[in-house]
Image (cartoon, rainbow, N blue to C red):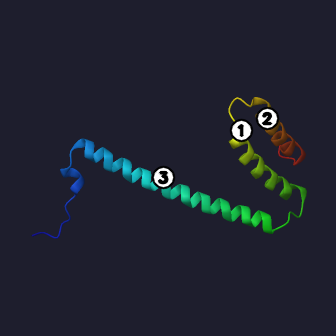
Amino acid sequence: MTDKPVELDKHRGMAAQKATDLRRVLAEVESNVRQLRDREADLENRMMMVPAMSWPEAAVKARHLLNLYAASLPSEDTRHRALVAALFDDFARLGGEG
């Protein structure tokens, strides 16, 4: 008997090791997605609860909403994508960022 743990992955075949690695990576990705969704929900709740005190603060909220909208656009909707990009350029220009 030994106190040294046995690494079971070394005793599996290559296919089983790859399947185990994929399951572990998938579990990590799913965990990260859940955390990201929770953080995004927290951010959006804060944005709804706290009114903007300036135009730049309002633009931050608008940028977030526009990013959500743009992400939902089909890739062939180039007109609306270009409009969102132009609006981001306007925000940067009017906000002194560019």
Q: Nearer the viewer, mark 3 or mark 1?
A: 1
Give the quarter of the image for residue 80: top right
**Pointer 3: what residue?**
29
Name the element at disc 2. helix
* C-alpha gap between disc 2 and disc 3: 31 Å
Q: Look at 74% across and 45% down and name the residue there.
A: 69
* C-alpha gap between disc 1 and disc 2: 8 Å
Q: Look at 68% across and 65% down and name the residue there.
A: 42
**Pointer 1: what residue?**
73
In front of the other: 55 or 32: 32
Relative to 24, 83 lies left or right:
right
Question: Where is residue 76 drawn, in percent x and y?
Answer: 70, 29
**Pointer 2: what residue?**
80
Mark 3 residue crowding within 10 angstroms, few (<14) / some (14–19) / many (20+): few
In front of the other: 96 or 80: 80
* C-alpha gap between disc 3 and disc 1: 24 Å
Question: Which amino acid type corresponds to the residue marked 1 in the rendered image?
Answer: Leu
Q: Are the residues at dot 1 and dot 2 in contact (C-beta closer than 8 Å)?
A: yes
Mark 1 and mark 2 lie on one chain; the one further toward the N terminus is 1
Res 28 label: none
Q: Look at 22% across and 56% down and name the residue there.
A: 8
Q: Residue furthest left?
A: 1
Question: Where is residue 27 drawn, in percent x and y?
Answer: 43, 55
Mark 2 residue crowding within 10 angstroms, few (<14) / some (14–19) / many (20+): some
Question: Where's the C terminus, which quadrant?
Answer: top right
